[in-house]
Image: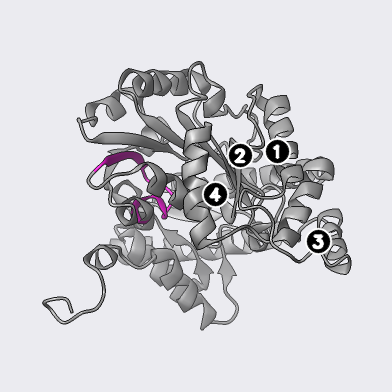
Amino acid sequence: MHPEGSPISQRIREIPPSGIRRFFDLLASMEGVISLGVGEPDFVTPWRIREAGIYSLEKGYTSYTSNYGLLELREELAAYLAGRYGISYNPHRELLITVGVSEGVDLALRAIIDPQDEVIVHDPSYVSYMPCTVLAGGVFVPVPTNMENDFWVSARDIERRITPRTKAIILGYPNNPTGAVMEREELVKIAEVARRHNLIVLSDEIYERLVYGVEHTCFASLPGMRERTILLGGFSKAYAMTGWRIGYAVAREEIIEAMARIHQYTMLCAPRIAQMAALEALRAGDDEVEEMVAEYDQRRRIMVKGLNDIGLACFEPKGAFYTFPSVKGTELSSEEFAERLLIEEKVAVIPGSTFGQCGEGHVRCCYATSLAEIEEALERMGRFVRRLRRHRTK
């Protein structure tokens, strides 16, 4: 027994509960709430993809697959990456099907991190990066970003934080929570830093298809980065398949074999039914993806304009389906703003502090909901902000 009498490990006690889940719990107890908090598409998985899952059930395809995943799916993914980004991977030894990108992050970090190895990550960032680093025994090293530079992380700021213990860099672009998309020129500079210091880069590109008026750069496609990159992707966002829990990791054979070794003892394999659906998504889902992206783009423009109009300064996100407006002018913390907005106007947003210290002063608003709900949410938020202003001037 632990000296203090607790059976819980010190490592687990260092991990805070998810700030997102706390607001979901509040949300569940209220009626009439418009949620801009959940980071998932409001679209139903396209019919042809659902039908592939149904067909697999009808045919009795309910057994395990290889730990690495269906070879047919891995071959299709390898062809997709080669055709879209010009990078070649061996589907037999360099590609692993995971249970969502979140499992991919966990596997990648556990596969490469030794105790006290340092992992450099931009702040704000996806909520899983820090806990997964700690669970792997690593040390999380945040690099500040801000709205003034569109939440880009610079190669210079990364290099300043490199020590002899640094093992890896995590990049999540297009970004959750900010919607930022980094341009190729700056990513090339980060690649040069990784090469110079012999670092691995985990590039979480789950939102790679959700970009607006810009081109996504696949980090592994940059010169010299194929062998240094663990590329993580999936089907949840672009294909509206969040509940199917299908992702993938691609990297050089040594790394994928190590990740698969952990995967085979903890998850065994991703569900065959979901893998069959993902295969159909790759083969026939492009039209639906383009339709959803066009709809997100319209919502994005309305959301950004609406937030700026009510006085919540918001830079223009170029990817994913989030805006990250500043609430500093309200003189409330991000958590106070989110909690009061939920209670007083029944609009759910996520405090920026959930995503790191640099998220404080912002809230994440997801526009993966209908235009009617977005417009109503903006009306309620405007009313809330005006009421705060009146109280401050009394």
| C-alpha separation, residue under disc 3 versus residue under disc 1 | 18 Å
Q: Residues within 10 Å of mark 2 (few under 14, many from 20)?
A: many
Residue at image mark 3:
53
Which element type, helix, strand or loop, lies under badge 1?
Answer: helix
Residue at image mark 2:
95
- Of callouts 4 and 2, the N-terminal one: 2
**Magenta span includes 125:** yes
- Of marks 2 and 1, the one in the foreground: 2
Which element type, helix, strand or loop, lies under badge 4?
Answer: strand
| C-alpha separation, residue under disc 2 versus residue under disc 1 | 8 Å
Judge whether residue 178 can be spotted in this image: no
**Magenta span includes 46:** no
Residue at image mark 4:
322
Of 76 and 367, nearer the camera is 76
- Of callouts 4 and 1, the N-terminal one: 1
- Of callouts 4 and 3, the N-terminal one: 3
